[in-house]
Structures are given as structure tokens and as C-alpha cells.
Image: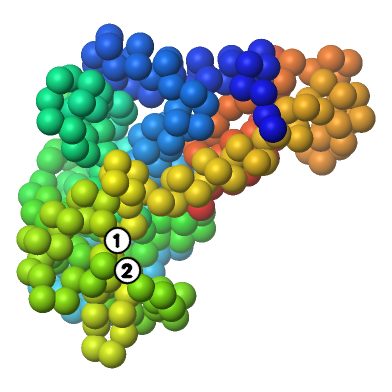
């Protein structure tokens, strides 16, 4: 069992709480009060909204290229293809909330009726794993791209980007995003259900999305196949984030115990490969959503557990 009071883990906890952007002083204090696993959930909920900068190949859903909204916005879409292939920073085309609303206090903490606080969450990302990019080449004086009605829905992993559809902010709840994701998943064997959960049969898109926004796992029938809908908890958190945090807690246990051991340090630097200093000053850090040990004086980061993006 890992001891959260170990100095290196306490320092990591404080770093995480300071790293997440928020506008309220009370929100910052709340972050510092969270235990490490809960704080990691909040960190991933925010940091996963930012696409890590690295070159990727681009593929599309088979319905993407024939859609009218794709054709109407082809020049802007192709500009994103070039940025993604070149590994350029996509942050200016994302929601501006990522710079200010990494954590918003829950409704209950504000004395309001309890419920999911969506002010610091991206429903499309947490529920379906899709980022949405604005479709403008114009970068304003504040460093952000001009906001557009049309949005490009993209799923990223470490080496590729998958274009699903062109929609807008209404696509979150009007059923168009949910339907496209369901149809896309129906073509993937790994998405077919072998068990059961709440069926969406007989429910319209509005009712289904209301239930999903409260954390109910819904299924969608596409032809003769049944696939998952939204993959979120009752707190609006991505189940993939929760699984990653559980893996982080298991992963860091042994390296935390051995981080000051000379043999462990030597093996770590040999894997780089680098010369091992006499007493490396290790701290735990997140690089994007990867967790690892950082040698503070040189900035050398040793990844212990990578994230999917």
C-alpha cells in the first residue's frame, strides 16, 4: 500500500493542484484538499483536453468525405490535416476554457442542487473520446483562432488522428455526434457489447443524452449490432481517465519506494542512455498525461506509464 505522506508524493500532489487552471480562489483551495487519486482525476479531466504536440497520420471515417459539411469546409479541414501531419500545436483551435476552467467547484460545494458540474468538462471528449477543433485559419491577438460555428470532431492517439464529422456545439446533445460515434463503433469488433447496460431503445436523442450526462451507460442499436454510447461516470468523468489513474497508482508504487536506491537509479539512466549522477533529484511529474520521474536539474523525464494520446 502506497504511503501518500511520502515527501515526493506530497510535492507531486501540490504540483498537480497548482498546475490546473482555475479562476476562483476557493477552487484552488479545493484542489489542494483532494487526495492524490482524486487530484489525478481532475488533472486528467483538464489536461487531456489539450492535444499533445507530435506528428500524426490522418484517417477518416468512411462517411466523412461525402458529407456536405465536410465539403463546405474543405479548405479549413485540409489546413488541419497539414498541421496534424507536421506535428504543430493545435491548442489555438481548441476551447478557450482549457486556459481558465481546469477546475470548477461542484454545485454542492456552492450550495446549489447536486449534479454534474460541466463547467470544467468536455462532454464530447469524456463521453466519446473526441476533441473538437474550430475551423478558422485566423489567429487573433489573444493567441486563439477565431471561433467558428462549425467544428471538426477528431479522435487522437499517439500516432494518428481520426476525423469523424463536421458538426457544431449542438452536436453534443442533438444526437448527431452520438449517432456518428455509434455507427463508427458498429464497424469495430472491439466495440460490440458482450454484456448489457441501459438500452436507448425507444428513447429520443434528447432523452438519451440527458441520461448520459448524468452518467448512465447507454447502448445504441445499429442494424443488428449493439454498441456502447457515452463512456462516463455519474460525475461526468471519462471512464478511461478513471482506469488510467488506477494504473498510475499501481505503477508508481515500486518506483516511489526505490527512487533513492542507487541500483534503481543506475538502471533508469542506463535505459536513457545517460550517465547516472551521484544523487539525482527525482520528482514525480505528468508530461501531457504520461506519468514519470523527472530529474529536476536537467529536465530528464523517465516515463513510467504513457497515456493513449
Q: Is residue 16 visible?
A: yes
> Which mark is on residue 76?
none
> Which mark is on residue 197?
2
- For mark 1, what is the residue? 217
Height in image: 97 above or below 128?
Answer: above
Height in image: 256 above or below 159?
Answer: above
Where residue 267 appears, as percent x and y from the top left, is 87, 36
Q: Residue at x 29, y 17 (%)?
A: 27
Q: Secondary structure at mark 1?
A: loop
Quadrant for the N terminus, please.
Answer: top right
Looking at the image, residue 85 sits to the left or right of residue 137; the answer is: right
Where residue 101 appears, as percent x and y from the top left, is 25, 27
Where residue 156 appears, as percent x and y from the top left, is 41, 56
Height in image: 230 above or below 51?
Answer: below
* Residue 224 position by quadrant: bottom left
Q: Are marks 2 and 1 in contact (CB under 8 Å)?
A: yes
Task: Judge by depth and name the residue closer to the eye, 135 or 198.
Answer: 198
Amino acid at each position: 500500500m502506497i504511503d501518500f505522506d511520502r515527501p515526493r508524493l506530497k510535492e507531486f500532489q501540490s504540483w498537480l493542484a497548482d498546475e490546473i487552471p482555475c479562476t476562483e480562489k476557493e477552487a484552488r483551495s479545493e484542489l489542494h484538499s483532494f487526495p492524490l487519486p482524486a487530484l489525478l482525476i481532475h488533472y486528467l479531466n483538464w489536461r487531456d483536453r489539450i492535444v499533445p504536440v507530435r506528428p500524426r497520420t490522418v484517417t477518416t471515417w468512411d462517411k466523412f468525405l461525402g458529407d456536405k459539411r465536410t465539403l463546405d469546409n474543405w479548405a479549413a479541414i485540409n489546413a488541419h490535416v497539414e498541421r496534424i501531419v507536421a506535428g504543430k500545436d493545435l491548442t489555438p483551435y481548441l476551447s478557450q476554457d482549457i486556459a481558465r476552467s481546469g477546475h470548477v467547484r461542484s454545485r454542492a460545494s456552492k450550495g446549489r442542487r447536486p449534479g454534474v458540474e460541466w463547467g470544467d468538462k468536455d462532454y464530447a471528449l469524456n463521453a466519446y473520446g473526441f476533441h473538437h477543433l474550430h475551423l478558422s485559419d485566423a489567429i487573433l491577438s489573444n493567441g486563439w483562432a477565431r471561433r467558428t460555428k462549425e467544428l471538426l470532431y477528431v479522435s487522437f492517439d499517439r500516432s494518428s488522428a481520426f476525423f469523424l464529422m463536421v458538426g457544431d456545439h449542438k452536436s453534443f446533445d442533438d444526437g448527431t455526434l452520438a449517432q456518428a460515434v455509434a455507427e463508427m463503433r458498429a464497424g469495430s469488433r472491439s466495440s460490440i457489447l458482450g454484456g448489457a447496460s441501459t438500452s436507448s431503445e425507444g428513447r429520443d436523442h434528447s432523452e438519451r443524452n440527458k441520461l448520459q450526462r448524468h452518467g448512465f451507460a447507454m447502448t445504441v442499436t445499429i442494424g443488428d449490432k449493439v454498441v456502447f454510447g457515452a463512456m462516463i461516470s455519474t460525475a461526468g468523468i471519462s471512464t478511461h481517465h478513471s482506469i488510467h489513474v488506477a494504473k498510475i497508482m499501481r505503477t508508481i508504487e515500486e518506483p516511489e519506494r526505490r527512487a533513492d536506491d542507487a541500483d534503481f537509479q543506475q538502471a533508469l539512466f542506463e535505459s536513457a542512455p545517460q550517465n547516472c549522477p551521484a544523487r539525482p533529484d527525482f520528482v514525480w511529474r505528468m508530461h501531457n498525461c504520461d506519468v514519470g520521474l523527472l530529474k529536476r536539474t536537467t529536465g530528464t523525464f523517465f516515463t513510467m506509464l504513457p497515456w493513449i494520446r
